[in-house]
Image (cartoon, coloured by chain):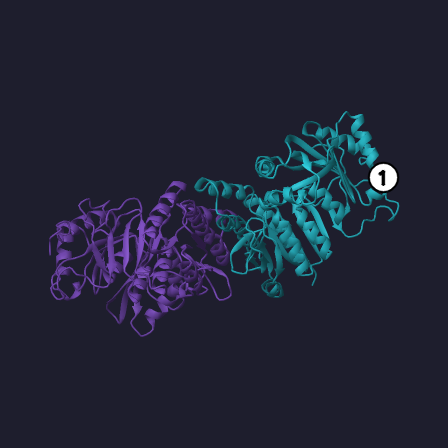
Chain colours: A cyan, B purple
Amino acid sequence: MSLVIHKYGGSSVGDAGMIQNVARRIAEVRKQGTGVVAVVSAMGDSTDDLLELAHSVSDQPHPRELDLLLSTGELVSCTLLTMALADLGQEAVSLTGSQAGIHTDTSHGRARIYSVDTARIQKELQEGRIVVVAGFQGITESEDITTLGRGGSDTTAVALAAALEADRCEVYTDVDGIYTADPRIVPEARKLSEISYDEMLELANYGAKMHPRSIELGAVYNVPIYVASSFNDTPGTLIHGESDRGDMEHRIKATGIAITRNVAKITVRSVPDRPGVAAALFEPLAQGGISVDTIVQNTSEDRTTDISFTVSGDDLKAALAKVEELTSVIGFGTLISEPGLAAVSVVGSGMQHTPGYASRMFRVLADGSVNIDMITTSEIRISCIISEDQAEDAVRLLHRGFQLDESDAG
Amino acid sequence: MSLVIHKYGGSSVGDAGMIQNVARRIAEVRKQGTGVVAVVSAMGDSTDDLLELAHSVSDQPHPRELDLLLSTGELVSCTLLTMALADLGQEAVSLTGSQAGIHTDTSHGRARIYSVDTARIQKELQEGRIVVVAGFQGITESEDITTLGRGGSDTTAVALAAALEADRCEVYTDVDGIYTADPRIVPEARKLSEISYDEMLELANYGAKMHPRSIELGAVYNVPIYVASSFNDTPGTLIHGESDRGDMEHRIKATGIAITRNVAKITVRSVPDRPGVAAALFEPLAQGGISVDTIVQNTSEDRTTDISFTVSGDDLKAALAKVEELTSVIGFGTLISEPGLAAVSVVGSGMQHTPGYASRMFRVLADGSVNIDMITTSEIRISCIISEDQAEDAVRLLHRGFQLDESDAG
């Protein structure tokens, strides 16, 4: 029997009617003889409601307790979906992360899956049942409940697809696929019928709605991931291993434009230019759970160097505090912080080895009078840090500049 | 180290402030060197909210799914309480019913505990932690979540007290103990400083706020149960094995008056008077999950008999349907149903062997012009089924008639 994993996000199971709608969609697939494992997120804003409840009791909720609390949101949605399936005459069973065999490490709030014990799911599937799994959660070796972090239900779904060797993982959400840019910013953005894992990973890291971890996992286990709307039957986007657009060495087209808002830059000036300095700077940030994104190091005069890096605007205060400890204790140089930035990125396979991409990006931005603050590149992405005020304009300019609105361009 | 079990009902953990208050109470006890395992119910009306949510999705929610859904209510309150304890500097850990080792049968919605595996709780206690357990829930052998039925958190608490050999089980609630009658009906009702399991069991079965199963369990394992308010430090009531009020053979005082509202009576007339008839009548009711309370059988003329029994008014329709099947198929007699009744009971140890109790009860009711519909007695209780309209008056009359308002009576 073929097997698909369905994943439904919070906006697709926001109320009773939407849950019944999702149940009908799943029942249709099952009736055609396909096995279905459905992974659900918590209903609508219920995770935020639980967070608010926790903060009403405690300023700093204990991470282990917070995880058990948050895990209840997905238990609610998955039991309701299972009830709705039963009402449609479908044999169905809900499973908690623990019952579904999702084993994780002990990092509460951002646990990583280390294995999936599929015995229970396999048994239920063999008995003909639809299996509904609470997303976003797992269990440690000592049987404590963990959560995988925001968007973790995507990761649950892909991990199950990999462990169960499902035919594919279908992620249903409130958008109907992956676009060349955010359609709210660029009205002429086009939906992609397919995209490679690598490209999607860059898009996801730089603003698209999928959880980057789930894409990584999909790439490692070669799980085809199909992203589509839970509200209609419009064809979505297939994320898979091979990009077919153009032959391997002659790809000259960008795939999409991504945007990350609320970026802040910290520059440490006049850092002694000797080994170990970067480690001394970034280790405390990592230990503090602060994600550092772009890092740029320039040489300055007098055997010192300037290091600039970006963090989320939400982490700026904490990051500055960590770095200030160092500047005062170890004798680093001066600190400059700059909030209110954004990253705009052009993503496309093999871009770095194709001359002209970067210069074209800089030209487009220059023509639009957008000043570039920092530049970083990866194998398949060029990102510029610019003022957040100009970010949406920049996305529109780049979308046009890279002819992404022309469906047969390239 | 001495060990106590604390149990807090939903009305004691209704909001963040109340949860913080409960945390302070527990922390005080822990600071005095006593080990504490706290069992909590779901916050306020949250169980009803979850039920409503289930019914918004499904007319007849699947029992297994409903149990997993309802179990989240206690997970929320127990994690919040644990966070509040952590904020007070107390090492604390929350455990789900599963983590707490509460093993039950598979009767979803009304599961019975068959064993408690205390390994995890013992480990946490040994490490000096306060353990907060989600009440009302357990896990089956196949790792499915069950709930113990309404009021099941009391049962969880007493079961843990028994399994952990705790010094006592303290049940904190919104009343400050067990009274000789409901103080809302009888203003001069007195609080009992102690009461035996048997008497409490009758009071609980006939209207007092404790869950009868928890009292039964307490009696079997000889767990002293202390019932008091979570809002103040007024002394409560100790439920234990020996009643000290009067010597064993000369007890001539009732303990309390209980009331059960919403009682309905069904009478099956002209039932053939032969073996197996009662079984044929009550087996289908039991299979339908309908609790039958008082049963009375009278002989009538012509080798037939009349059987009357009472059920909860909520079950009347279902019970009539079950019995009608029989009257038509097996040829029973006619059916009469009477809703709008109540049971008033006088409870006291050894009452049945003390002449005069029953006649005194009947006299008091007669003097108050209360008509008695049915009468049943147990070792320590006399109950009369009367019109619900007269029930509160009857409780007041009986409270006065048995001199329960005189603290040194008896």
Q: Tell me where residue B224 appears, x and y as whole percent.
A: 27, 60
The answer to whether one can see residue B30 in this image is yes
Q: Nearer the viewer, residue B157 or A85?
A: B157
The disc numbered 1 marks a residue on which chain?
A
Quadrant of the image occupied by residue B374:
bottom left
Residue type (three-letter) at the residue carrying disc 1: Asp
Residue A61 vs B244, above or below: the answer is above
Looking at this view, name the residue that lies furthest to the top: A369
Q: Is residue A180 left or right of residue B263?
A: right
Residue A334 vs A140, above or below: the answer is above
Q: Nearer the viewer, residue B79 or B197?
A: B79
Mark 1 highlights which residue? A408
Looking at this view, name the residue that lies furthest to the bottom: B275
Mark 1 secondary-structure assignment: loop
Residue at 16% from the left image edge and 63% from the top image edge: B351
Q: On the rendered image, what quadrant is the N terminus of chain B found in?
A: bottom left
Residue A141 vs A370, above or below: the answer is below
Q: Residues within 10 Å of mark 1 (few under 14, many from 20)?
A: few
